[in-house]
Amino acid sequence: MVNEQVIASIRQLTEALLALDPDYFLVEVKIKPTNNVKIFVDGDKGVPVAKLVQLNRALYAQLEADGIFPDNDFSLEISSPGLDEPLKMHRQYLKNIGRKVEVTLLDGSVKEGDLVVVSEDFITLEEAPAKKKGKPAPDQKKQLDIHFTEIKHTVVCIVF
């Protein structure tokens, strides 16, 4: 079982490295029982691979130097969250304004629409009206406010 203190230490080291460039932020730290450390980093305009490589090298060296894992028995992966990863942070919601999202609520219902507003307490989706069989959808779009406390998870939809 991974110690929460180890995760906190890795989080602190990662955030210190990211503090040098405020365009990037830590999303999540996961550690598998095999000491595979997986870190998700995001950026307001995405994260270039070169930045991920730079972070990986710097953090790997710090983890070795600090001896967080006995005999330095660990692996480290740093990546940006994929499109299949749910949004976890307020800053991720802000970066995705204007994109189509799917929101699963705590009651199990699913709402889909364009993310048009992100406040401290809620998001606003603009839902396209449903098409009725054989008829075009009306031009009216409906706005729906959803409080963060009601959200189970939100994913960005891939639109072609």
Image (cartoon, rainbow, N blue to C red):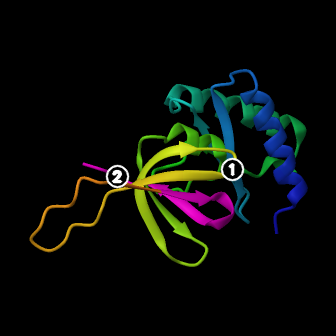
Q: Which residue is mark 2?
A: 158
122 vs 136: above or below: above
- 87 with respect to 63 (left or right): left
**14 vs 132, nearest the viewer:** 132
Q: Which residues are magenta?
A: 144-160
Q: Which residue is mark 1?
A: 28
From the viewer's perspective, is the residue at label 2 or at label 1 nearer? 2
Which mark is drawn over residue 134?
Answer: none
Mark 2 surroundings: few (<14), some (14-19) or many (≥20) residues within 10 A? few
Label 1 sits on a secondary structure element that is: strand
The answer to whether residue 153 is magenta is yes
N-term mark: 2 or 1: 1
Mark 1 surroundings: few (<14), some (14-19) or many (≥20) residues within 10 A? some
Report the residue at 80% width, 47% height from top.
72
143 vs 20: above or below: below
**Percent of width and height locating residue 61:** 76, 32
The answer to whether residue 9 is magenta is no
- 128 with respect to 73 (left or right): left
**Percent of width and height locating residue 100:** 39, 50
In which image quadrant can residue 10 be found?
top right
- 86 with respect to 129 (left or right): right
**Percent of width and height locating residue 140:** 29, 54
Report the residue at 24% width, 53% height from top.
139
Residue that protrudes farthest toward the left in the picture:
134
Report the residue at 70% width, 62% height from top.
32
**Percent of width and height locating residue 144:** 49, 58
Q: Amino acid at mark 2?
A: Ile
